Image (cartoon, rainbow, N blue to C red):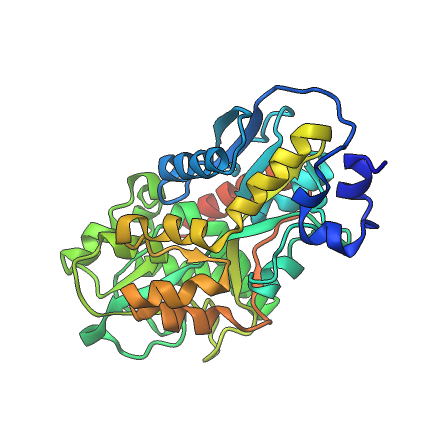
Amino acid sequence: MLTVKEIGFSGEAPEEIRKNDQAFCAGMSVETDDSPVVIYYYFDLADTDHFCRKLEQRFRTSGHTRGIEFKNWNCYKTEPGRDGDIFIYDAIALSALAEKGYLHRLPEIIDTEDMFSWTIDKSKFRKKTYGIPLMICSNALICRREDDRGVSNITELHENVAIPMRTMLMYYYLQAFCNCQDQSGGYKMLEHLAELTGGREFLDKSSLGDYDGVERFKRGECRYFLGFTESLRFFDPGDYVVRFANFSDNEEDQMPLFMVDYASLGNHVREEKLLDCLDLLEIMADGQFIYDLCAPEGRLQYMLPACKGVYPRLAQLDPLYDQLYEMLLPEENGVFRYGVRFYEDFYRKSDDLLKSLMESG
C-alpha cells in the first residue's frame, strides 16, 4: 500500500494520482494526528483577515474538520517558527527559508497550469520547486491620464514624486543594479530617487509605515506616484495610467523583476495532516478563491494574481486589468529573490545604503 510520503514526495506517483489527490485518500494507513494546521501567513496582504476567513470557510465547506491556527508573520524581519505546516511569504526570502530547512518541495499533484509560468520556474531552489505563487507585486509608476507624459523610465522624471524610499531602498538598488550590472549605476539611481522625494532630508521619513504618498498624490502635490497597484483602491475615481517602474536609463526594462507571494509546505508535515495541507494549497490556487480575494463583494483591491484565468473577470470590473495582464505575460519577467543570507544581510545592507545617501547629501 502506498504511504502519504511515497505519494506526496517521491515524484514517482502514477499520473492519475497526481491529477487528483482525493482519489487515493481512501484506505491509506496513516497515523492519527488531530493537531491544527499551523499557517504562518504574510502580514501584508491587502486584507489578511479576509484571506484567513475565506480560506477557513472553503476548507470547512469541502468537508474538513481539522483546526487551523493562523500566525501573523513579518517574513521580512524574522524567521518563522519551526511548527509551521504552511508558510506564506514574499519570494525575497525563499532561498533563505529553503536553505534553513523550513520548506519542502512542492508535490506534483498541485495544479499550477493556470499560473504565469515564470512564477513557477523562478520558485525553484537547487532545481526543486518550492512554492505555489499567489500574488504578484510590482513597483508601479502611476499618474492621472491627463498628466501622462509617456515616461519610459525613472531617469526621465525631474519633479517631486511620492516615493516610499526608506522601505523600498534595497529593491530599487537591486533593480537598477540588475539593469546596469554596475554598483555605481545602482547607487546613482538611488541618488536620483532621493532628489525626486524632495531631498535627502526626507529619506528617513519615507517608510511605508508613515508614508503619506497616496494623500500627497490625491492632493495634487505630485503628478506621479511610485508604489504598488494596490494603492489604486485608495485613489479617487478617475482614469489612471499604470506602468511597471523601469529603474534604468533604457526605454524598456531589460530585466523586469517582480515581488511574488508564495505558499509552501512546511518541511516536517506528514501523514494525514499532509493531505489537509495539500487541500489548503489547492484552495489557495483555485481561481474562484483568488477572484474573491481580489474583488471581495465586487470591490477591486487592485492586487495582481498569479492565476492568469482570473484577469478576464477582473477586467470586467476595470479594463485596466487587460493592460496589466499583457505586462505580466512575458517569459523574461523575473522574481525578486535574495540569497540564503537574507535575514542576516538584507536590511543591514539597506541601512548602510540609507546612511551613505544621507551623509552624501
- x 78%, y 42%: residue: 7
- x 43%, y 61%: residue: 310
The picture quadrant where one finds residue 233 is bottom left
Report whether residue 214 is seen.
Answer: yes
Left or right: 70 in relation to 203: right
Q: Nearer the viewer, residue 11 or 88?
A: 11
Q: Residue 225 location in percent, x, y?
A: 29, 60
* Residue 213 sits above or below residue 24 on the image: below
- x 53%, y 37%: residue: 75
Q: Residue 312 location in percent, x, y?
A: 39, 68
Determine the residue located farthest toward the front in the rendered image: 27
Q: Residue 360 location in percent, x, y?
A: 43, 52
- x 24%, y 47%: residue: 212
Determine the residue located farthest toward the left in the rendered image: 219
* Residue 41 sits above or below residue 244 on the image: above
Q: Nearer the viewer, residue 170 or 110?
A: 110
